[in-house]
Amino acid sequence: MAESLVDRVLRGQSWLDPVADFTQRLVGGFYGALGPLGTALKNFAHGTWALRHPLHPALTDFPLGAWTVGVIADFAAIRWHALPTQAGDMALAAGVVAATGAVLTGYTDFHETWALERRSAFVHGLTMTLAFALMAVSLALRWWAGAGTHTAAVWIALIGVLLTAFGMYLGGHVVYRFGSAVDRNAFIEAPEEFVDVGALADFPEGALVSVDAGAAKVLLVRRGQEVHAISDVCSHAGGPLDEGTLEGDVVTCPWHGSKFCVLNGSVRGGPATFSQPAYDCRVVDGRLQVKLAEVMS
């Protein structure tokens, strides 16, 4: 399959890896230094607690819209005097405020990327950070440097909008090319009728066991004669939950530390934002059978 131009270029930029790794360690170190508060803040920034949906993309549209409106208002004020110059200034300021949240959540999501995905996400982040800085400079020139710098501030904002558009293209590449923050269970072909996965006696008490239920990987946890089952594929990045750790009713993914309740698949900790599909279990003549608890449409 022919490789895209973006991937082809980034594949040759090995210098990005140590810089991206350093940035990831800074992000992780920041949250780690805050202890339990850092864990809660990181979960909030991922969207684990706030939305049960990635927070970063929910924050990105407003800055682009506000900055685009601001630049249009700027040129309308300069060329036709149809609007006061303050209209563009206020739109730009609103975009800067909203973009602050987008930058913080974006670098939080970047913390769990790797390989070529990480390079793409890092360049996306650098591009958007530069655009944010240009908008902040433009805003400073408008409000504190005097009226004589307003035209220069408008042109800086225009460059910032164009850079933002390119950065958002790269962000889309990260999501749609690599599936970053996309629910890895969205396209599972899970059985909607009970299927046999083995003899109940073959599953050790309290162990994390992965079985094939048709084309789906299912994680089983046996407690006496009761068995709990959820998807074995971590919704965040596809990690194998059966290789993780189990504490009480919570399994931790070995890749990025997402936590899920094995009783119902609910998210107990990020970076995952989507719950795991849960499975119904029954025992017939000593054989364990499972099926998807709720048909996903």
Image (cartoon, grey):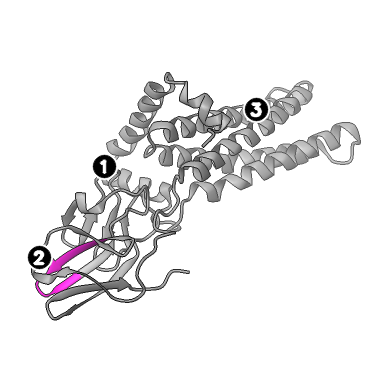
Total numbered labels placed on residues in the image: 3
Q: Residues within 10 Å of mark 2 (few under 14, many from 20)?
A: few
Spatial CA distance of label 1 from label 2 is 40 Å
The residue that disc 1 covers is 35
Disc 3 residue type? Ala
Viewer-nearest residue: 29 or 247: 247
Question: Mark 1 or mark 3, which is nearer to you?
Answer: 1
Q: Residue furthest bottom?
A: 285
Looking at the image, can residue 90 be seen? no
Local secondary structure at mark 3: helix
Label 1 to label 3: alpha-carbon separation: 35 Å
Disc 3/disc 2 C-alpha distance (Å): 68 Å
- Amino acid residing under circle 1: Gly
- The span shown in magenta is 218-227
Residue 85 placement: quadrant: top right
| Closest to the observer, 127 or 178 | 178
Q: Is residue 226 above or below residue 44?
A: below
Mark in front: 3 vs 2? 2
- Report the disc number at residue 202: 2
202 relative position to 216: left or right: left
Residue lying at 62% horizontally and 42% vertically, measured from the top left: 63
Quick check: 39 above or below 89? below
Residue 226 falls inside the magenta stretch: yes
The label on residue 3 is none
Residue 161: % across, % down? 68, 34
Work out whether mark 1 precedes mark 2 in sequence or the reverse, and give the earlier one. Answer: 1
Q: Secondary structure beneath disc 1?
A: loop
Q: Which residue is mark 3?
A: 140
